[in-house]
Image: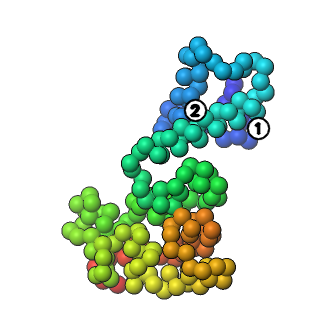
Amino acid sequence: MLGEKWIANNVPWVKAHIGVHGNEMADTVAKQAAHSTASRYEYTRLPKSYLYHVAGEEAKQNWQAECTTNNKSAATKRYFPSVQHRLRTKLTLTTKLAAVLNGHGKTRTYLHRFNLRDDAICICCYNDQTVVHLLFHCEKTSTHREFLKQRISQKRNWMETEQELISKHTEVFCEFIVSVDFELLLQNEQ
């Protein structure tokens, strides 16, 4: 019934227990509330919108706590130091953009980490081929980077942190990511 009502109101329904992070968190919070004897709220007297708000805020706090205590996802934290920062940034995620934001893209360093390449050295021969190297230092992406700098300079000075690029220049940064041919950068010579 609830699923049908959500679909009728154009709210997407998500199948339970398939690994969707927010859905799993909501399920956990709901189970904790159902088993708790020390409830802070009289749920029958509160509007549903308030309950949704409280559940949403609690889920954000849990997500932030998980991100803070988790020593993984260092690459993503350079772009989004907090959950609130990520939620404020409007993105249309593509496979390529997601790979850059989480550092799991097809770079020589990433593939070398899993023994899929013999070495991690970039084709420019100056450093390991990480996403940061490709974005900010590699001579093979310098043309793309100069275009990015020019587009940003029209508004302000060139920003050199991932967080500033994604928060202040989202559209231009995403265009830059699309313009870089990561497959070509994996080849032995360009």
Residue for point 47% across, 41% down: 66
Residue for point 65% across, 55% down: 88
Q: Nearer the viewer, residue 67 or 177?
A: 67
Please provide percent x and percent y for residue 96.
48, 64
Q: Is residue 151 visible?
A: no
Judged left or right of residue 155, residue 186 is left
Please provide percent x and percent y for residue 72.
39, 50
Q: Nearer the viewer, residue 101 or 106?
A: 101
* Residue that badge 2 annotates: 26
Residue for point 31% across, 69% down: 108
Judged left or right of residue 113, residue 69 is right
Instruction: Indicate the quadrant where residue 171 lies.
Output: bottom right
Number of numbered discs overlaid on the protein picture:
2
Instruction: Indicate the quadrant where residue 155 lies.
Output: bottom right
Task: Give the quarter of the figure containing the N terminus.
Answer: top right
* Disc 1 residue type (three-letter): Asn
Give the numbered dot on residue 9.
1
Q: Secondary structure at mark 2?
A: helix
